[in-house]
């Protein structure tokens, strides 16, 4: 179920990666400078992949907290959670500490992965993505995608958990 939340006269390319497509492979460094390659999860874990707008985004922080609160359930469903941000690792570390996050926050320097996934917010002067969440199976096939174009309507962890349960 793809949901693109409304925005009048949308110019962004958020429909580039769709349900049924495979998540494109990338390698990014986490907030602690450790490289994380999406291919490492291939055949091993389902994926919850979240692109956050900004480390100061309240909606994104709320969603990250929800993911953390459900992390044991996500892990029990044989899935891994990853978040991608264009913010510098020092800000990601602060966010990770503030929210007590136990999953990787990945640094997308120069918005390379954001552009690869077609999530670049054309209204963002710093190249931030639209807040978006993907759920993909162990073969990287996307079964769920939700883009939050207006940055107000919420992303819901319950929908992500339900999507993961379909893989069981």
Image (spheres, rainbow, N blue to C red):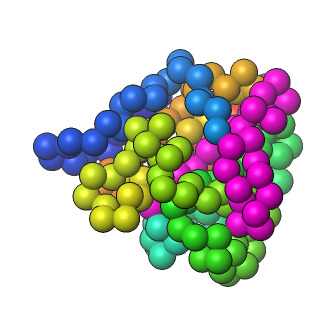
Residue appearing at x 37%, y 48% in the figure? 120
Q: Image check: 38 left or right of 114?
A: right
Q: Percent x, y for residue 101?
A: 74, 68
58 vs 41, nearest the viewer = 41
Foreground pick, 167 / 7: 7
Q: Is residue 68 above or below residue 93?
A: above
Q: Give the percent coordinates (x, y) of residue 122.
A: 27, 52
Relative height, residue 161 to residue 101 (above, below): above
Q: Position of 80 compared to 95: left or right?
A: right
Specify the segment rendered in magenta: 27-53
Q: Which residue appears at 53% of the width and 44% of the height?
A: 113
Residue 85 picture quarter: bottom right
Image coords of residue 126 (percent x, y): 37, 65
Residue 108 quadrant: bottom right
* Residue in the picture at 48% in, 56% down: 110
Q: How many marks?
A: 0
Residue located at (65% from left, 77% from top): 90
- Expressed as whole percent of the image width and height from the top left, the position of residue 157 reads 60, 51
Residue occupying the far left of the picture? 9
**Furthest-front residue in this view:** 110
Q: Is residue 43 magenta?
A: yes
């Amino acid at each position: 179920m793809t949901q693109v939340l409304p925005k009048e006269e949308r110019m962004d390319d958020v429909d580039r990666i769709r349900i049924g497509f495979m998540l494109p492979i990338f390698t990014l460094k986490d907030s602690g400078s450790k490289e994380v390659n999406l291919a490492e999860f291939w055949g091993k874990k389902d994926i919850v992949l979240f692109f956050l707008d900004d480390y100061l985004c309240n909606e994104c922080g709320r969603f990250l907290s929800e993911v953390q609160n459900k992390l044991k359930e996500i892990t029990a469903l044989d899935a891994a959670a990853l978040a991608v941000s264009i913010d510098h690792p020092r800000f990601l570390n602060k966010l990770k500490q503030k929210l007590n996050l136990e999953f990787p926050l990945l640094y997308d320097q120069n918005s390379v992965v954001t552009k690869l996934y077609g999530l670049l917010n054309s209204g963002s002067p710093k190249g931030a993505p639209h807040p978006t969440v993907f759920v993909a199976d162990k073969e990287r096939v996307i079964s769920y995608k939700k883009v939050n174009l207006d940055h107000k309507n919420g992303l819901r962890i319950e929908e992500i958990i339900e999507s993961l349960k379909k893989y069981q």
